[in-house]
Image (cartoon, rainbow, N blue to C red):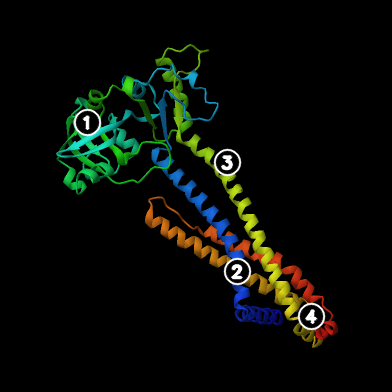
């Protein structure tokens, strides 16, 4: 065992020495494998980060809530919009019915949004903001983060006081800080509204949802005086499951209660949609599985090119050191020692290329994270994958040259020029 370890250690030192002596050859060999590992790890890192960010966004919308809406979330080229166009819109009055009849519902709230609004403060203004009107308990379901001020009180919700909680993009554009915004009076579509709170900046959303950074959130009863939600918005009811209740139980009870409320007959189809975050989240696994497969397919060709480059360099190395191989075998070196020597050299070469590829990916993630709110992360799993692939490529690319070297006849090898 000790003898084997010594042989491996000596072979490793010789491999590193050869790489240092032939710097240009080493660099060209490293370039191919570095590009290959960079491609595959960059693809994995990008897709994994994208999936993680999307799942985080979906979870922030609520993984224990049901959205009662006119339109279902599933899309595609065959989306049967004509089946849903004549469905009734959810009504504010239905929230009270759900809270009374649906025992598996913990909290319920009504909301609607309307874009393209103008927000003014003195001589400054912002175009294209989103008016978001919500009823009581919405902030408890979505857990809105306020950095300054407060949220609506129950009385303000009940009477429809003209107060507003501003998203980060709006208070950044009109005021110097969230503290400076609270207490000021702005105009939304020409109507005065007092700022009582400012939301924490969230960053751009990956999924198609409410962009709270660009929202002016007002009580529902005040919001309906600014916009007729029956004509110019797409209202919805959001229902959070009670503690100890599964989402399936909530969905089943909601379906029965809303069907009863809408007076639907047993054979009639639902005239509403019960949308849930978990259904969208479940589709991500198959989608990103296909993306990773496509990325791996592209990176495979880069690795093949790099592997052939390593194999070619190793054949040249064997040719240059034929005399030395012959001398080693003449004084008693075994075939496995010669095989291991060249195999280790190939593996070390590929590992160095893999480490350089991983370093490039890491540097890019650092740069991207400093420039955008999108979070890129080079995970330990991807590092292990990169090093494992590098080792595998080194073994495959170096085995044939190493095997050829181990089979050389000592006399013929010594006499070769």
- Which numbered disc covers residue 286? 3
Residue 33 point in image, percent of width and height: 61, 64
Q: Nearer the viewer, mark 2 or mark 1?
A: 2
Q: Nearer the viewer, mark 3 or mark 2?
A: 2
Q: Nearer the viewer, mark 1 or mark 3?
A: 3
Q: CA distance from mark 3 to mark 2?
A: 34 Å
Q: CA distance from mark 1 to mark 3?
A: 44 Å
Residue neighbourhood size for the residue with mark 4, other residues' Cα within 10 Å, grouped as few (<14), some (14–19), many (≥20): few
Asked whether 177 or 250 is in front, the reply is 177
Residue neighbourhood size for the residue with mark 3, other residues' Cα within 10 Å, grouped as few (<14), some (14–19), many (≥20): few
Q: CA distance from mark 1 to mark 4?
A: 86 Å
- The residue at 55%/57% (across/down) is 41
N-terminal of the pair, mark 2 or mark 1, is 2
**Residue labelled with disc 4:** 334
Query: Helix or strand or loop: what does disc 1 sit on?
Result: helix
Classify the position of the C terminus by image quarter.
bottom right
- Which numbered disc covers residue 154? 1
Q: Nearer the viewer, mark 4 or mark 2?
A: 2
Q: Are marks 2 and 1 in contact (CB under 8 Å)?
A: no
Left or right for 127, reference 29: left
Q: CA distance from mark 4 to mark 2?
A: 29 Å
N-terminal of the pair, mark 1 or mark 4, is 1
Q: Can you say whether 11 is above or below 33 in the image?
A: below
Q: Are marks 4 and 2 in contact (CB under 8 Å)?
A: no
Residue 233 point in image, percent of width and height: 34, 25
Query: Helix or strand or loop: what does disc 3 sit on?
Result: helix
Q: CA distance from mark 2 to mark 1?
A: 66 Å
N-terminal of the pair, mark 3 or mark 4, is 3
Classify the position of the N terminus by image quarter.
bottom right
Residue 392 seen in render: no
Query: Helix or strand or loop: what does disc 2 sit on?
Result: helix
- The residue at 38%/20% (across/down) is 89
């Amino acid at each position: 065992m000790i003898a084997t370890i010594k042989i491996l250690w000596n072979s490793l030192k010789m491999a590193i020495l050869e790489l240092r002596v032939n710097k240009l050859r080493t660099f060209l060999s490293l370039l191919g494998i570095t590009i290959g590992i960079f491609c595959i790890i960059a693809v994995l890192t990008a897709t994994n980060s994208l999936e993680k960010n999307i799942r985080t966004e979906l979870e922030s919308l609520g993984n224990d809530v049901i959205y009662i809406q006119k339109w279902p979330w599933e899309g595609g080229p065959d989306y049967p919009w004509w089946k849903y166009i004549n469905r009734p819109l959810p009504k504010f009055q239905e929230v009270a019915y759900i809270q009374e009849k649906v025992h598996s519902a913990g909290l319920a709230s009504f909301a609607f949004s309307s874009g393209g609004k103008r927000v003014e403060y003195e001589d400054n203004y912002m175009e294209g903001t989103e008016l978001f009107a919500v009823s009581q308990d919405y902030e408890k379901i979505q857990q809105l983060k306020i950095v300054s001020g407060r949220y609506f009180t129950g009385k303000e919700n009940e009477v429809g006081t003209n107060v507003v909680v501003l998203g980060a993009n709006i208070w950044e554009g009109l005021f110097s800080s969230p503290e400076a915004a609270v207490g000021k009076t702005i105009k939304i579509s020409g109507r005065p509204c007092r700022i009582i709170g400012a939301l924490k900046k969230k960053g751009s959303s990956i999924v198609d949802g409410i962009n709270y950074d660009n929202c002016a959130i007002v009580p529902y009863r005040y919001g309906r005086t600014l916009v007729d939600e029956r004509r110019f918005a797409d209202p919805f009811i959001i229902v959070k499951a009670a503690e100890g209740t599964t989402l399936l139980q909530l969905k089943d009870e909601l379906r029965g209660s809303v069907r009863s409320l809408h007076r639907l007959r047993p054979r009639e189809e639902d005239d509403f949609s019960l949308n849930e975050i978990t259904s969208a989240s479940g589709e991500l696994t198959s989608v990103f599985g296909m993306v990773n497969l496509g990325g791996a397919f592209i990176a495979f060709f880069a690795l093949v090119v790099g592997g052939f480059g390593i194999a070619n360099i190793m054949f040249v190395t064997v040719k240059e050191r034929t005399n030395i191989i012959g001398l080693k075998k003449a004084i008693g070196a075994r075939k496995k020692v010669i095989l291991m020597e060249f195999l280790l050299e190939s593996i070390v070469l590929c590992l160095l290329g893999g480490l350089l590829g991983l370093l490039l990916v890491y540097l890019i993630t650092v740069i991207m994270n400093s420039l955008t709110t999108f979070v890129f992360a080079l995970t330990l799993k991807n590092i292990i994958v990169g090093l494992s692939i590098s080792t595998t490529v080194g073994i495959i690319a170096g085995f044939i040259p190493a095997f050829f070297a181990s089979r050389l006849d000592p006399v013929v090898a010594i006499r070769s020029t």
